[in-house]
Image (cartoon, rainbow, N blue to C red):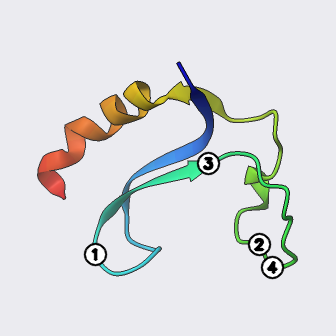
């Protein structure tokens, strides 16, 4: 089973575009852009390891809202 590192989940995001959405922030970025809005996502060894099934189970309770 493949797992990815998740920095955070935002259940009712309204900042990243029009409307309401479920936002998933991945952890571990090597680009380190000078004007990055999420530098806390850069570290490769942080965040929570989650499988696709685990991520989907986090999203499922909110399906009726989207």
Q: Which mark is residue 36?
A: 2
Q: Earlier in the sequence, mark 2 or mark 3?
A: 3
- Crowding around mark 3 (Cα neighbors within 10 Å: few <14, some 14 to 19, many 20+) is some
CA gap between label 1 and label 2 equals 23 Å
Determine whether label 2 and label 4 are within 8 Å by CB: yes
Count all numbered tags in the image, as a single digit: 4
Residue 30 position within the rendered picture, expressed as x and y whole percent measured from the top left:
85, 56
CA gap between label 3 and label 1 equals 21 Å
Q: Residue at x 31, y 40 (%)?
A: 59
Q: Residue at x 78, y 54 (%)?
A: 29
Q: Secondary structure at mark 4?
A: loop
Q: Earlier in the sequence, mark 1 or mark 2?
A: 1
Q: Single out the residue that lies furthest toward the left.
A: 64
Residue that label 4 marks: 35
Residue that label 3 marks: 26
- Crowding around mark 2 (Cα neighbors within 10 Å: few <14, some 14 to 19, many 20+) is few
């Amino acid at each position: 089973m493949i797992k990815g590192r998740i920095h955070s989940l935002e259940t009712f995001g309204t900042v990243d575009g029009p409307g309401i959405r479920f936002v998933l922030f991945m952890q571990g970025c090597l680009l380190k852009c000078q004007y990055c809005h999420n530098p806390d996502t850069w570290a490769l060894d942080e965040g929570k390891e989650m499988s696709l099934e685990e991520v989907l189970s986090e999203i499922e309770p909110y399906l009726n809202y989207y």
